[in-house]
Image (tube, helix red, strand yellow):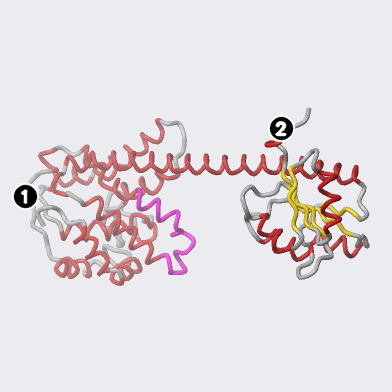
Amino acid sequence: MVEAATDKPLVLVVDDTPENLSLMSAVLKDRYKVKVASKGERALQIATTSPAPDIILLDVMMPEMDGYEVCRRLKADPRSAHIPVLFLTAKTDSDSEATGFQVGGVDYIGKPISPPVVLARVAAQLQLKRMADFLRDKNEFLEQAVSERTRELSAIQDVTILAMSSMAETRDNETGNHILRTQRYVQCLAQKLQALPQFANVLTDAYIHLLYKSAPLHDIGKVGIPDHILLKPGKLTPEEFEIMKTHTTLGYLAIDRAEKSLGMNLPFLAPAKEIALYHQEKWDGSGYPEGLVGEAIPLSARLMAVADVYDALISRRVYKGAMSHDEAMAILRQGRGTHFDPVVFDAFLEVEDEFRRIAINLSDPDH
């Protein structure tokens, strides 16, 4: 069955001899649409103009720009790199053929041509091109599908974390933008530490992104603290403080249960569990819930410790007023090496101005 003219593949024939162009056109015209070019520059123009040729038959020995150079330029241009090139030439020695393949040609047809050989070689290369085009389109489709699915999963993670963290915020409405600020503090501090050799392998861009996502869950356990303790305007009694301290464990267990309910391990929740459980630990071992010391405290929690305390000091709470940045810094400096990892704290001092900007840009409405 003969294909409709509009469905015929387009063949570009490039040769500086009019007689050869006429001959090739006569051989090809019944099966293919044919365009011709007598110079390399013109061939390059046609190859990069829509509709692009499906295949190019290219003479080697041409003035101004030989076929090898034309092929090099075709393969260097993304618009034409996928078009198969068949060389047509009287230069059939092995060195010439090797050069043709090196510059990107897919076949070599000697002159004088044999029409049946030309038609068979063109048909074979067009079939290969159709397969290559199909695979390329399929790969592009799959890449797009994977990209869309990745964005969807990332959005699901974001919504899940923010939904969970907002539960804690609704219980403690004085915190306002606290979770948004701490999220950005942690990211800022992690990016600063990323340049240090001892953290380079841990604080990858991907892990910092997870920390950014996880930070809002640090106080999720407050949903389990009774209102008369969580919202108490005065100082907590020792007994009340012991109950308040359980918010770390409650937060960890809430995230862990949510993960287990899905029947699978979710790596993106690992730093969230660490932060929820250990952000109240102190470098000298005087923190809670486990009294961990030094680097036994996960790095994620050491970062959050600085971010959380800084924000707590500069924010108004039911039991206290907001401090100025300088007042907060004076108190924080006293905790270097006792409350806070000294290396992390020194990095914090280097990004102090960025913390201040974050606090201003995300200040609570009454500030």
Whether the magenta-drawn stretch holds residue 248 is answered as no
Mark nearest the camera among 1 and 2 is 2
Q: Residue at x 31, y 47 (%)?
A: 276
Instruction: Give the residue type at disc 2.
Output: Ala
Q: Position of residue 306 (x, y in %)?
A: 27, 61
Q: Which residue is mark 2?
A: 4
Q: CA distance from mark 1 to mark 2?
A: 87 Å
Please, what is the dominant secondary structure of the magenta stretch? helix
Question: Mark 1 — residue?
Answer: 234
Q: Which residues are magenta?
A: 194-213
Q: Quadrant of the C terminus?
A: bottom left
Viewer-nearest residue: 103 or 34: 34
Q: Secondary structure at mark 2?
A: loop
Closer to the camera, 114 or 218?
Answer: 114
Looking at the image, residue 87 sits to the left or right of residue 84; the answer is: right
Q: Quadrant of residue 240?
A: top left
Nearer to me, 230 or 46: 46
Give left or right: position of 218 versus 106: left
Instruction: Indicate whether residue 208 is drawn in magenta.
Output: yes
